[in-house]
Image (cartoon, coloured by chain):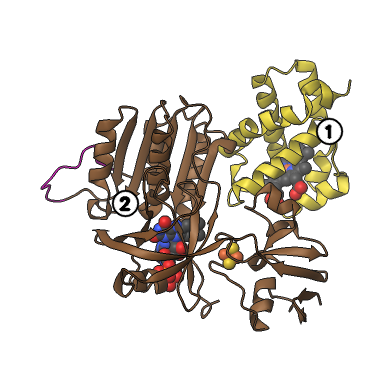
Chain colours: A brown, B yellow
Amino acid sequence: MAIVNYQDCAIEIGADQSLLDALLDAGKDIPHGCRAGACQSCLVQVTEGEAPENAQSGLKETQKQQGYILACQCHPQQDIRIETDASTNSYRALVNSKHLESRDVLRLRLDGDFDYRPGQFVNLIRDDGLSRSYSLASVPELDPELEFHIRLHPDGQFSGWAGNELQTGEELEIQGPFGDCFYSVSDKVKPLLLAGIGTGLAPLYGIVRDALQQGHMGPIHLVTGARTSANLYLLKELKSLSSRYPQFSYTPVVLEAPEAVNEPIEGLTVGDLNQVIKDQFSDLSGYAVYLCGSEQRVNSLRRQAFLCGASMKEIFYDLFVPAVSTESA
Amino acid sequence: MTLYERLGGEAAVDAAVDIFYRKVLLDDRINSYFEGVDMDAQAGKQKAFLTMVFGGPNNYDGKAMREGHKHMTGLTDIHVDAVIENLGATLKELGVADADIAEVAGIANSVRDDVLNR
Ligand SMILES: Cc1cc2nc3c(=O)[nH]c(=O)nc-3n(C[C@H](O)[C@H](O)[C@H](O)COP(=O)(O)OP(=O)(O)OC[C@H]3O[C@@H](n4cnc5c(N)ncnc54)[C@H](O)[C@@H]3O)c2cc1C
Ligand code: HEM
Ligand code: FES
């Protein structure tokens, strides 16, 4: 059985246990969220012994070389020593405003000042330690505040609390930023396709505005998928962006056709997002593609984009992997 | 110059991965074997495959090929032929000379019995 040395303790790691679970069982206070290798909040550094490669998926090359791993993905076979990290930044941030954008999307603005790129994500941490990942929809050069779009799940521990109880003026802890799903295109005329499901729009909204403010001139297509038109949001903002920037276009795609149309939504397309992409973007060679939203949908969009000709290296994506709660794990 | 060097080494492998993988995913004869595997992980394996059949540095021997494909039920000559065909079409698209394509196919073919576990 492998031992992990941490601080002054030698902790045994059970056969079916992850490094994270072993540390938590031993009463160590290790930040964590998704337990699925997505949120990076459980980042630790291996200082002695081998850093298992499969626990480094999604990390930056420089982090890999320094022996960083995701504790929730690590099942050590040999003894290791780890250190928790001083390189992950954390901040306190004041809640400035809360606004319901549609019946189930909360737009949250925090006062915060740190370096990030729109489309990256942070972990928002409640005082009792409950931590969830949310993507940055704001652009530091344009917006004084940090902006998040939080889909309200009826039984969601964090989203439910954020929707019902969190008050403006309260503080949250922020850890991050993480992720490489952001605008890093050096070729300013490259065509971009951004597709998101639900609040997958959050990072994409940041990326689109970032690309535009950095002077991107190639076509920028944003496509979002939702169940019904009542689940769409930011329609006004996106419309005003497309009238201001001729290179930008927006297509909302809904599965169910709206019944009574009070105010027709411009460009509204009824159908399956994958199919719409297949039909309207049948040749994605030369595109940079950004995909965000739930794991299953994004994976099938990745496949679709790839089959339409997008190069694997030019597909950037964030999977909104749900956090497994400790109780059910 | 070795075959691997003639083809362009690692850069050629990188160029071929996307094209080859896309062909495999679209080929109904074999795509079911490749579905359900994470795309990033799969791309790494395609790279390993291409490096091997390009005659580049790799750690595979017949035994490893046998082990690696043993769990894929129902593999037959048709499947190996399909893989080699997609490989050839990929190289053709990249402008590789016919003689080199034949040499690559030969390497792939040399582990046929191992891949088919016979
Ligand atoms: C990198 C990353 C970025 C993210 N960015 C965003 C973002 O910008 N906006 C956003 O709204 N969310 C985002 N998420 C998801 C977010 O972190 C939470 O998982 C989500 O808000 C649910 O948390 P909760 O505490 O409210 O629900 P929980 O208490 O964790 O879950 C409650 C119940 O809802 C179910 N559930 C949770 N999520 C989903 C889902 N997506 N679909 C269906 N059922 C679900 C759970 O299985 C559970 O049964 C992101 C996740 C990751 C990993
Ligand atoms: C033609 C000869 C073939 C060669 C030389 C070959 C070679 C390889 C190599 C080197 C790997 C990577 C192994 C690893 O590092 O894990 C691999 C994986 C794989 N091969 Fe083949 N292969 C051949 C034929 C086939 C055929 C015919 C199929 C099925 C139609 C197939 C399906 C796969 C799959 C699905 C994987 C990934 C396995 C996994 O994810 O575990 N291969 N192959
Ligand atoms: S990555 Fe380990 S808890 Fe989220």
Q: Are marks 1 and 2 on the same chain?
A: no
Q: Please state if B38 lies on the left or on the right of A324 as rendered.
A: right
Q: Please state if A174 lies on the left or on the right of A9 as rendered.
A: left
Determine crowd level at label 1: few under 14, some 14-19, many 20+ residues with C-alpha closer than 10 A: some
Question: What residue lies at 27% left-to-right and 31% top-to-bottom?
Answer: A244
Please give the residue where the numbered disc 1 appears in the rendered image: B56
The secondary structure that dominates the magenta segment is loop
Q: Quadrant of the C terminus of chain A?
A: bottom right
Where is residue A124? Give x, y as percent: 46, 65
Q: Please state if B1 lies on the left or on the right of A245 as rendered.
A: right
- A45 in relation to A138, above or below: below
Q: Please state if A154 lies on the left or on the right of B55 as rendered.
A: left
Q: Quadrant of the N terminus of chain A?
A: bottom right
Question: Which quadrant holds residue A10?
Answer: bottom right
Question: What residue lies at 71% left-to-right and 44% top-to-bottom?
Answer: B45
Please give the residue where the numbered disc 2 appears in the rendered image: A226
Question: Between marks 1 and 2, how big is the CA–CA gap?
Answer: 47 Å
- Asked whether residue B118 appears in the rendered view, the answer is no
Magenta part of the protein: which range? A259-270
Where is residue A149? Give x, y as percent: 36, 57
- Amino acid identity at mark 2: Ala
Question: What residue lies at 40% left-to-right and 70% top-to-bottom?
Answer: A171
Q: Nearer the viewer, residue B64 or A156?
A: A156
